[in-house]
Amino acid sequence: MNIIREIGDFLFPRFCVLCDKRLSVSERHLCTTCYMYLPRTRQVEKEHGRLERILWGMQDMGNGHRVIERAATFIFYTSNSRLLLHKVKYEGMLSLGIQLGEWMAKEMMDASHQPSIFDSIDVIVPLPLHRKKQMSRGYNQCDYIAKGVSKVTGIGVDTQSVKRVHHTPSQTTLDHEARRKNVAGAFAVVHPERLEGKHILLLDDVITTGSTIMECANAILKLPGTKVTILAVAHADKNPVPESVD
């Protein structure tokens, strides 16, 4: 098998998507150096860290349920991670999306903090796109990141139970309060029987202010006995400094 891969790499060389260095047979999408220097947040290693506290402040306590269980991201949203996610989201490099999910899951499972963020999770729900946007783009990048996480963890993926029912304008230029209003009521659970009483891992590609993913989480948390943990590949933190590990 290695000989076949070596021949394939000789005939059709592959290159690092960040530095354009030729990849070895064992490397996928990124060379070892670029992979090692991805700006890890280390959030999963710190209980009740900065991201969790930010999202708790957006919890809809009117639904009668507790706050989200946990929240973490893999890397900070810097120039390199922005390029990676742009290639997945806008250039259709879906195999890279799967790979990002695998890398994220493997590193979080190997982290020293116990229990693992994946412990007790029943199902992965990728943050849905509105059907118009998904038809225009041709795919939801979060579905492919979820495939990578599922491949490593063995947890199933549900792309049908939660829908984005309002087609909202881009949030790129909006401040926090405008983002919150923009996504109000944007999500609905259309198959509650599939999620009631379960612990859902709600997955996104990038968390900026957290308004969008918390709007979705609040919709899910209205279901009886349901728990939500939030996970994303990147965090667009204004202060991208890795949190220290206690």
Image (cartoon, grey):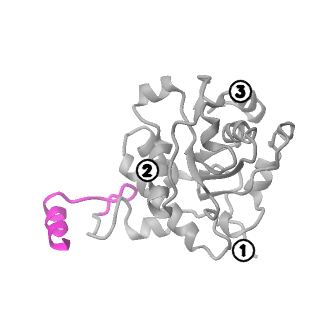
Q: Position of residue 105 (x, y in %)?
A: 52, 63
Disc nearer the start of the sequence (1/3)? 3
CB of mark 2 within 8 Å of CB of mark 3? Answer: no
Q: Nearer the viewer, residue 180 or 193?
A: 193
Give the total number of marks visible in the rendering: 3
On screen, 50 above or below 139?
below
Q: Which residue is mark 1?
A: 245
Q: Which residue is mark 3?
A: 185
Q: Residue 153, labelled with which disc?
A: none
Q: Which residue is mark 2?
A: 97
Cα distance, mark 1 to mark 2?
A: 28 Å
Disc nearer the start of the sequence (2/3)? 2
Q: Nearer the viewer, residue 219 or 34?
A: 219
Q: Position of residue 229 (x, y in %)?
A: 68, 53
Q: Amino acid at mark 2?
A: Gly
Foreground: disc 1 or disc 3: 3
Which stretch did the figure color magenta?
Answer: 1-21
